[in-house]
Image (tube, rainbow, N blue to C red):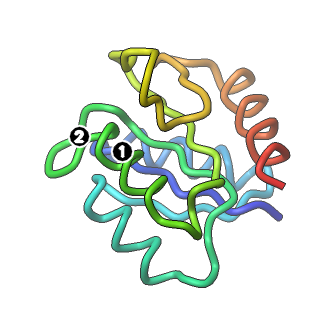
Amino acid sequence: MHSILLVDDEPEILTAWRLILENEGYEVGCASNGVDAVARVAAAMPAIPDLIVTDWMMPLMDGAELCRRLRAMPELAKVPILIHTAVPPPDGKGKHWDACLRKPVGAELFLTTVEQLCRQGH
């Protein structure tokens, strides 16, 4: 079973995707912003998620900074990161994520992308 950390400041989005992912057999943790996500991952060491799905625009620590911090942690450097956002991040130099899906995204595309990234991480 793959484990996923969902990071989004909108509780209804966290709840919906958590239920969908759990229904598909994934183990899911949730964080409401980047600061909370970094704390959750650090507290869970040595167990790390197989995939991190994060929003781009969040209070306290946005997706860009979260991705930078995760990639700077040796234990997490290879964990795939999926950006799930209404406003896509700039694509180019210094990109610290593996895939980006624009909100709203259908469940089928979301789940296919999650499955591919979880396989990629192993």
Q: Residue furthest left?
A: 60
Local packing at callout 1 (Cα closer than 10 Å; few below 14, some 14-19, many 20+) is: many
Of 66 and 31, the residue lying toward us: 66
Tell me which residue sits at (77%, 51%) in the image. 121
Residue under label 1, please give it. Answer: 8
Indicate the secondary structure of the residue bearing disc 1: loop
Of 72 and 118, the residue lying toward us: 72
Q: Looking at the picture, how far across and down is residue 68, in whole percent?
A: 38, 47
What amino acid does circle 2 point to?
Met
Viewport quadrant of the C terminus: bottom right
For this view, does 9 lie left or right of residue 101?
A: left
Whether label 1 touches label 2, CB < 8 Å: yes
Q: Looking at the picture, how far across and down is residue 62, in whole percent?
A: 25, 41
Local packing at callout 2 (Cα closer than 10 Å; few below 14, some 14-19, many 20+) is: some
Whether residue 115 is situated above or below residue 46 in the rendered picture: above
The mark that comes first in sequence, 1 or 2, is 1
Whether residue 84 is situated above or below residue 38 in the rendered picture: above
Whether residue 79 is situated above or below residue 87 in the rendered picture: below
Cα distance in 3D space between marks 1 and 2: 7 Å
Q: Looking at the picture, how far across and down is residue 3, in whole percent?
A: 68, 63
Q: Which mark is residue 58?
A: 2
